[in-house]
Image (spheres, rainbow, N blue to C red):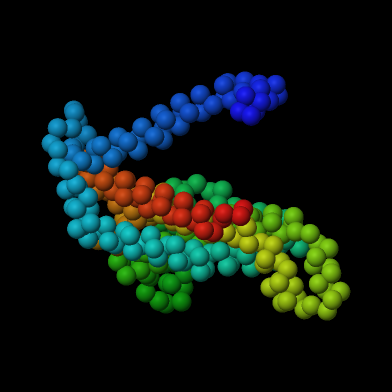
């Protein structure tokens, strides 16, 4: 039975395809994914500054130090906050706009591109632009505030408002990506089901609830996955806006890794943060795939 299957593989040329394309892919995956992960796990067991060979073995002390650091708890809290804002504000906004812009009317394509443009803009450029917008002396918000006679706000300079200002930028930048996902799913929807529901007397709300949304569930699950993984890995927007400050109030897991591991030359400590983040992401990815996307 096995010989017959192997002969079948040989006969249709699949084996040659596997032999040609699999080894290079495995080599690249090993070099750029597996080895860095293994090295990070190894370095996390040393007190090492990145120069020479690591020799000062400290075991799990770096992990204990990470969990005892105040900035780590702030970073973890901020990542959770970003996830909630993404799920409760960004995705519903994207879905609402997708339901409107998926229809054919004059200017629909232009509006889609307008809402999608922020996602195309580089994260660093976005951070620099909004750094100017939020500037309390010369920024756009300060100019608007002065027109109305208000005190110019310094949103990025206050621990109470810095994270809120960043959340606004996150929603503005990434909702267009999810909107386009939903529009693509809506355009592939079988219109005969919607027409049949209308013929049967269903209202617009009932069609949306019982026909359109169930058809969008696979796309919504994928969108949620992208939103959560992206929230856990957020870094590029943080650095040009606040650098994780003030007083670590806007740190995320990755900016915390960079600020406390890379810039301070604490490679072992930073590697421990990386391993923790890797475990969180992998655990979520496999759990979500197992329970939420098993039929997709």
Instruction: Residue 68 in the image: state x and y as whole percent.
Output: 19, 58
Instruction: Residue 154 in the image: state x and y as whole percent.
Output: 35, 66
Query: Of 93 and 62, which appears nearest the observer?
Result: 62
Query: Of 69 and 34, which appears nearest the observer?
Result: 34
Occupied quadrant, residue 158: bottom left
Query: Of 69 and 206, which appears nearest the observer?
Result: 206
Residue lying at the far right in this picture: please name it.
Answer: 199
Query: Of 184 and 190, which appears nearest the observer?
Result: 190
Left or right: 209, with 234 as reference point: right
Q: Residue at x 45, y 26 (%)?
A: 27
Q: Is residue 118 visible?
A: no
Q: Is residue 204 visible?
A: yes
Q: How many marks?
A: 0
Q: Is 167 drawn above or below residue 60 in the view shown? A: below
Q: Residue at x 41, y 52 (%)?
A: 283
Residue lying at the far front in this picture: please name it.
Answer: 1
Instruction: Residue 127 in the image: state x and y as whole percent.
Output: 43, 53
Location of the N terminus by quadrant is top right
Q: Residue at x 24, y 48 (%)?
A: 260
Q: Residue at x 69, y 62 (%)?
A: 215
Left or right: 175, with 5 as reference point: left
Q: Is 257 drawn above or below residue 168 in the view shown? A: above
């Amino acid at each position: 039975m096995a010989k017959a299957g192997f002969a079948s593989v040989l006969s249709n040329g699949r084996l040659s395809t596997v032999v040609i394309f699999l080894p290079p892919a495995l080599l690249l995956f090993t070099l750029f994914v597996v080895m860095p992960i293994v090295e990070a796990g190894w370095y996390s067991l040393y007190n090492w500054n990145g120069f020479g060979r690591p020799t000062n073995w400290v075991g799990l002390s770096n992990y204990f130090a990470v969990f005892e650091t105040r900035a780590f708890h702030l970073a973890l809290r901020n990542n959770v906050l970003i996830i909630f804002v993404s799920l409760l504000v960004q995705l519903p906004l994207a879905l609402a706009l997708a339901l409107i812009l998926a229809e054919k009317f004059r200017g629909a394509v232009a509006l889609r591109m307008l809402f999608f443009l922020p996602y195309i803009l580089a994260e660093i450029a976005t951070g620099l632009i909004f750094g100017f917008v939020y500037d309390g002396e010369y920024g756009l918000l300060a100019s608007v505030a002065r027109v109305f006679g208000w005190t110019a706000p310094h949103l990025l300079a206050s621990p109470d408002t810095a994270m809120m200002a960043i959340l606004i930028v996150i929603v503005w930048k990434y909702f267009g990506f999810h909107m386009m996902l939903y529009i693509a799913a809506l355009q592939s929807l079988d219109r005969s089901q919607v027409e049949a529901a209308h013929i049967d007397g269903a209202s617009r709300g009932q069609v949306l609830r019982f026909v359109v949304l169930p058809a969008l569930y696979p796309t919504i699950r994928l969108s949620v996955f992208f939103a959560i993984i992206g929230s856990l890995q957020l870094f590029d927007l943080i650095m040009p806006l606040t650098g994780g400050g003030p007083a670590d109030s806007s740190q995320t897991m990755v900016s915390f890794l960079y600020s406390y591991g890379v810039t301070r030359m604490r490679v072992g400590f930073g590697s421990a943060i990386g391993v923790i983040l890797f475990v969180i992401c992998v655990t979520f990815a496999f759990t979500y795939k197992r329970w939420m996307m098993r039929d997709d």
